[in-house]
Every structure is written in structure tokens, then in C-alpha cells.
Image (spheres, rainbow, N blue to C red):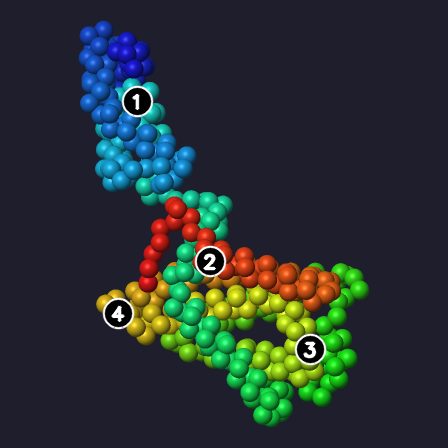
Amino acid sequence: MKAAEVTSAVSGRIGSFFGRGTVAAPADIESAALRSDKFRLEREADWRRLEDIVAKMERGGLRRIDDADLLALPALYRTAASSLSVARETSLDSATLTYLESLVQRAWFQVYGPRKGFFGWFREFLLGGWSRAVREIWLDVCIALFVMVTGAIVGWVLVSQNTDWYYRLVSTSMADNRVPGASRETLMQTLQVEDSAGGLSGFAAFLFSNNAGVCILAFALGFAFGIPSLMLLIHNMAMLGAMVWLFAGQDLGWEFGAWLSVHGTTELFGILLAGAAGLHIGRSMAFPGTRSILEAASEAGRRSAVVMVGVVLMMVVAALLEAFPRQLVAGTDSRYLIGGVFLTFWLAYFYLYRPDHADEDTL
């Protein structure tokens, strides 16, 4: 901004310098212009640097900012805010005042405002945040997986020893015609496809509500040192083990596995992660290390919450798979193909997909 331009801008506000109704002399106007110009020149380098940093953050977030600029950002913001305060009190030229107001407002949002909107958060969640959180609770996933496999084995052994256990493990509403003593044809009928897709959307909504409820319960029970979460996993898998025993007894184990795999590779994976997330909180509370219990639980809770957001998405996918492909796709090979594709996808996403920009944290 040239001195002449500053002189013109100041002339309209010069009354605030010299009092109302006073006609400013040319020397007074020139003095005010020089003072404004000097104020700007002394601080302009910091303003420009702050403007460059803010512009980079607005275009691409923190990834575009080097460490030196990131460390300097708070100090540069305070300098600009202080300059704005001085400019208002001394009634500097309107152009400088407008520029500083805009710069300080933009910088405030980068320093104190929300870092990203929902879509920015969701994009970061899918492109690294979710998979990273799952890898961070790897020990809890391993424990939960061991418990689930053990639960399925326990269910099989119990019903093979005494069929009365089947009715204790499998609810009447879920059993339907799948009960001990049912013929092979009856059991095979329960694995058949539907004639049409009519009504399956409502069925999908019901399945999502049921599956999500199980996952949220497994997660919520984690506060009691994770023990109730593990017990819930054992119960659910014991029920599955009992049903596998039933179908295997009629030489339908392979067919039942295909029927289950369509949605089961997603649904069971989601239940596994939900149980592991609950266990992660409970384990952090039981073994906080050098942290306080509250601090350990808070940190684990934030990490587990990210996992649970993804689990809800997995339950949506599982419900759609259970309501449509499982009910409409015939053929054992086709069903195994669908289940295998989704299992491969989840494993690759959680354990092989590691974006370069995602920082890897450890337990």
C-alpha cells in the first residue's frame, strides 16, 4: 500500500485522530499516513507468513505445513490479533483494518476452531483412522478371537453330550425348525433361497437393529474389566457351535457354512471387534500402568469409540448381506465366494491398508 493511498484512506477517518468537526491540515494527514504505513511495514512480514500458513491449512490441512511453521502458528496468530487491537484503538486506515480482521478470523479457525467438518472427519476415518484404531487394539482382538473360538467349541461339546443344552443355548425364535431330531430335508429347507425380494428391506432393518444391539452391548459391558464382554462372546458363539453341530449331524455342515458365510464373515468380524473394543477399555482400567485409571479409561475409550463407529457400519453391511444375497443367491460355491470376498476385504483393510499419511500409534 503506497503512502498516497494510505493518505486517502485515512482522510475519511481523520476526525477520530483530531476530534469531531476539526478540519485536518495536510501536515496532520501526512503524519497519520506515515504512522499507519510504518505500523504496517514493521509487521507485514509476520502477517504475510501467517496468511501463507493459513492458506495452506485451508487447502490441505496439517499435511501441507512443515514443523517450523506449525510451531510458529500460535505466536503469529497472537501477533496478528495484537496488531488488530492496536489498529482499532488508533484508527489506522480501513484497508489495513479490514485485512487484519479477515486474517485474524481465518487464523482463529485454524488455531482454535474445529479442525475438520463431518465429511473431512469421515474421509479420514475411512482412509486410515478406523483401520489404525483396530490395529492398536490387536491384543484385545486376539483375546476376543480366542474366546469366540473357545465358545463355539464349548457349544458343540455341550450339545453333543446332552441335547438339552441345545434348547438352553438357542432361543426358540432363532431355532424355528432347526432342532435336534429334525430331518435332513427339514434342515435343508431352512437354507433355501426366497422366491422374491419382497419384504427383505424390512428384514434387513430388523437384522441391523438386532446385530447392532449385540455389538453395542458387548462394547458397553467392557467397563467391568471386560469380563461381561467376554461372557457375551462365549454365549453367542456357543449358540453358533450348537447349530453347527446340528447341521453337521445331518451331513449339512458344508452347506450351513456357505449359508452362514455370506453375512457371517462380516457380522462375526464386527462382533469380534465390538467385544475387543469393550475388552480394551476393561483391560486398560485393570492395568492402567503409570496412568491413573480415569486417564487410562479415557484414552482407551476414545480409541474404542472409533472402532465402534466402524462396527456399526459393518452391521449395516451384514444386515444387507443377510437380507438379500443370503436369501436370494443359491449355490454353495456362490455363497462361499461372497463370504470369502468380504472376509478378504476386511482383513486387507484392517491389516494391510496403511496410508502413508496415517501416523501409527502403539499401545
Would residue 97 be visible to someone looking at this image?
Answer: yes
Label located before the other in sequence (1 or 4): 1
Amino acid at dot 2? Phe
Q: Quadrant of residue 31?
A: top left
Using the numbered discs, state the Cα–Cα distance from disc 3 to disc 4 in whole angstroms: 49 Å
The residue indicated by pointer 3 is: 252
The residue indicated by pointer 4 is: 289
Quadrant the N terminus occupies: top left
Q: Nearer the viewer, residue 253 or 329?
A: 253
Label located before the other in sequence (4 or 2): 4
Quadrant the C terminus occupies: bottom left
The residue lying furthest to the top in this view is: 26
Q: Nearer the viewer, residue 53 or 271?
A: 271
Using the numbered discs, state the Cα–Cα distance from disc 1 to disc 4 in whole angstroms: 54 Å
Q: In the drawing, does residue 89 fall left or right of residue 208?
A: left
Q: Secondary structure at mark 3?
A: loop
Amino acid at dot 3? Leu
Q: In the drawing, does residue 147 fall left or right of residue 70?
A: right
Using the numbered discs, state the Cα–Cα distance from disc 4 to disc 2 in whole angstroms: 27 Å
Would residue 17 be visible to someone looking at this image?
Answer: no
Q: Nearer the viewer, residue 237 or 201?
A: 237
For residue 350, the mark is 2
Label 4 or label 2, whichever lies nearer to me, is: 2
Using the numbered discs, state the Cα–Cα distance from disc 2 to disc 1 in whole angstroms: 51 Å
Using the numbered discs, state the Cα–Cα distance from disc 2 to disc 3 in whole angstroms: 32 Å
Residue 315 position in % (x across, y down): 57, 63
Q: What residue do we see at 62% from left, 79% from top?
A: 244
From the viewer's perspective, is residue 16 above or below residue 133? above
The residue indicated by pointer 1 is: 96
From the viewer's perspective, is residue 41 above or below residue 166? above
Label 2 or label 1, whichever lies nearer to me, is: 2
